[in-house]
């Protein structure tokens, strides 16, 4: 599990998070790739969150809960933390913490193994 696909709430592809080492470890580093499937998504707040992280460079991720898998992502220079939480079948949600407010932004998907 080295990749998390990130979508908006409607399930439209926004990009992904590439992790090293994989999410079977307790923590690591990651980078964001923001490549929305549809160009109209580039100006959306969801895509902007990924673009900011991509531009910031490398981020750090850490597992906060193993079952179900929950991850926090901290990006140097950005004031908000990102969270990714999975339910069953490798599908979950992602979003940001703004102070004490938790804002769900979209869907997070673990790609199926080949």
Image (cartoon, rainbow, N blue to C red):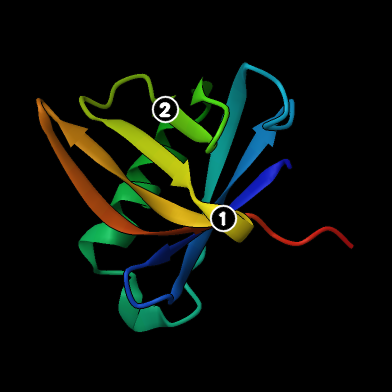
* Front residue (pair 73, 87): 87
Across and down, in percent, residue 105 comes to: 27, 56
* Front residue (pair 96, 36): 96
Does label 1 or label 2 sit earlier along the sequence? Answer: 2
Point 44% across, 82% down: residue: 38
CA gap, disc 1 and disc 2: 19 Å
State left or right for residue 46 relative to residue 87.
Answer: left
**Badge 2, how many Cα within 10 Å: few under 14, some, many 20+?**
many
Across and down, in percent, residue 92 comes to: 46, 54
Is label 2 in a helix, a strand or a loop? Answer: strand
Label 1 belongs to which residue? 88
Across and down, in percent, residue 69 comes to: 54, 36
Label 2 belongs to which residue? 72
Is label 1 in a helix, a strand or a loop? Answer: helix
Residue 89 seen by the camera:
yes
CB contact under 8 Å: marks 1 and 2? no
Observer-side mark, 1 or 2, equals 1
Count of all numbered marks drawn on residues in the image = 2
State left or right for residue 70 relative to residue 44.
Answer: right
* Front residue (pair 19, 67): 67
Q: Quadrant of the N terminus?
A: top right
Point 52% across, 44% down: residue: 32
Q: Quadrant of residue 66?
A: top right
Q: Quadrant of residue 52?
A: top left
């Amino acid at each position: 599990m080295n990749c998390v696909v990130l979508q908006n709430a409607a399930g439209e592809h926004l990009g992904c998070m590439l992790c090293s080492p994989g999410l079977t470890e307790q923590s690591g580093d990651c980078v964001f790739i923001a490549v929305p499937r549809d160009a109209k998504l580039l100006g959306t707040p969801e895509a902007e969150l990924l673009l900011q992280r991509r531009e910031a460079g490398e981020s750090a991720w850490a597992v906060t809960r193993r079952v179900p898998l929950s991850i926090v992502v901290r990006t140097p220079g950005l004031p908000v933390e990102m969270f990714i939480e999975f339910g069953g079948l490798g599908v979950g949600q992602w979003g940001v913490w703004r102070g004490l407010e938790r804002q769900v932004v979209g869907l997070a998907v673990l790609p199926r193994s080949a």
